[in-house]
Image (tube, grey):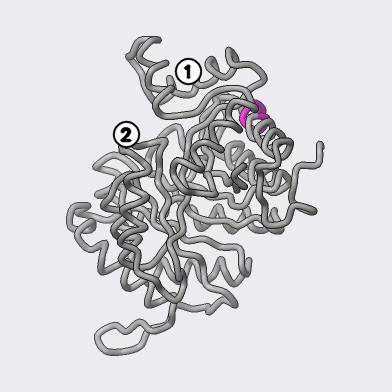
Amino acid sequence: MPSIKLSVLDLVPLFENKDAAYALGQAAELAQTAERLGFTRYWTAEHHDMPGLACTSPEVLLSHIGARTGRIRIGSGALLLPHYKPLKVAESFHMLASLYPGRVDLGMGRAPGGQAHASMALSGNFIENIAQIPDKLRAITELLEQNYEYDGYPVTARPIPPEPPELWMLGTNSKSAAYAAEFGMGYVFGQFMSDRDGAEVLQSYRNAFKPSPRCPGPRTIVTVGFVCADTEEEARELAAAGMSLFQSNISTEELAALAARKLLAGTPEALTMRLEEMSLQYGVDEFMLVTMIPDYRKRLRSFELLARSMWSSGGLQTQDKERGGFNGR
């Protein structure tokens, strides 16, 4: 049986007519719950001018989350690199890594994270910014290794933490996988957003990987959408309700077909078995879970049910089972 690590990706959604302050409070509760259950990481995404999501600045939220947790790794999933200068990115995550040593991940992505006008208001011409991605990735790796120069002069991203952030590239296709391989960083495949063959994309990353001081060998995570409930019927209903928030004007049948492609929905036992199968299929030992159940309590329970099932099967691997694992609370 595969030994699997579970992590959380939080989009920080606004549900139940609650405001952003409430949603951010629920983000902290999700991170604390994930830590108690033995999850490896809590990552939060970045989006701009999207009414249903409350996180525009992962580094600010992560500072809040880090102060309210003690062991779980915290990171961005993803910081949208086209919008930012490498030095500012490195400084922000060096600050986090100095506050929470050995716990910080810098996950980067290439998406705009919002509609065109929001993207332009944030950083100008997005197409031009995308073209700079290789140079930005190179600069960030040099800044984290403290060997960066600008116009021939050394520049250091301060403060210098005891341990630099882990570097990850997130994506849904071979382009992002190629960047991760070229710059010697971990790769996270977003299955919940992709119609690509995940096994093929991950293998392309492994084949092209170039070792780096930070990452001597390829490291992979697969992000999956999931809904876990006591019964199959309830899981399907919750999945459809979550998908309907982002897919309007489509039929119930189309919604069900979309949910089946984009996420796993079922009982704890069924999802445990499916993750174990996917671990072998994709050659990964870590899954990052995201769910858009439009009910905060049921969202937490979905994570709890799956973690309990994984513990019972002996398939859940944590950084610290004795302190971090599910304890029935």
Rate crowding at label 2 as few (under 14), some (14 to 19) or many (20 or more) other CA atoms within 10 Å.
few
**Tag 1: residue type?**
Ala
| Image coords of residue 308 (percent x, y) | 72, 35
Tell me which numbered mark, 2 or 1, is placed earlier along the sequence.
Answer: 2
At 52% across and 56% down in the image, what residue appears?
75
Does the stretch in magenta take in 298? yes
Instruction: From the image, give the main secondary structure of the stretch colored magenta.
Output: helix
Q: Is residue 158 above or below residue 209?
A: below
Mark yes or no: residue 272 visible: yes
At 48% across and 54% down in the image, what residue appears?
76
Q: Quadrant of the N terminus?
A: top right
Residues drawn in magenta? 297-301
Q: Is residue 281 above or below residue 170?
A: above
**Tag 2: residue type?**
Asp
Q: Which residue is mark 2?
A: 195
Q: Looking at this view, is 278 or 257 the one in front? A: 278
Spot the residue most to the bottom.
153
Spot the residue most to the top.
252
Number of labels in the image equals 2
Q: Looking at this view, is 245 or 57 the one in front? A: 245
Q: Looking at this view, is 62 or 203 the one in front? A: 203
In the image, 28: left or right of 191? right
Q: Which residue is mark 1?
A: 240
> Which quarter of the picture shows residue 268?
top right
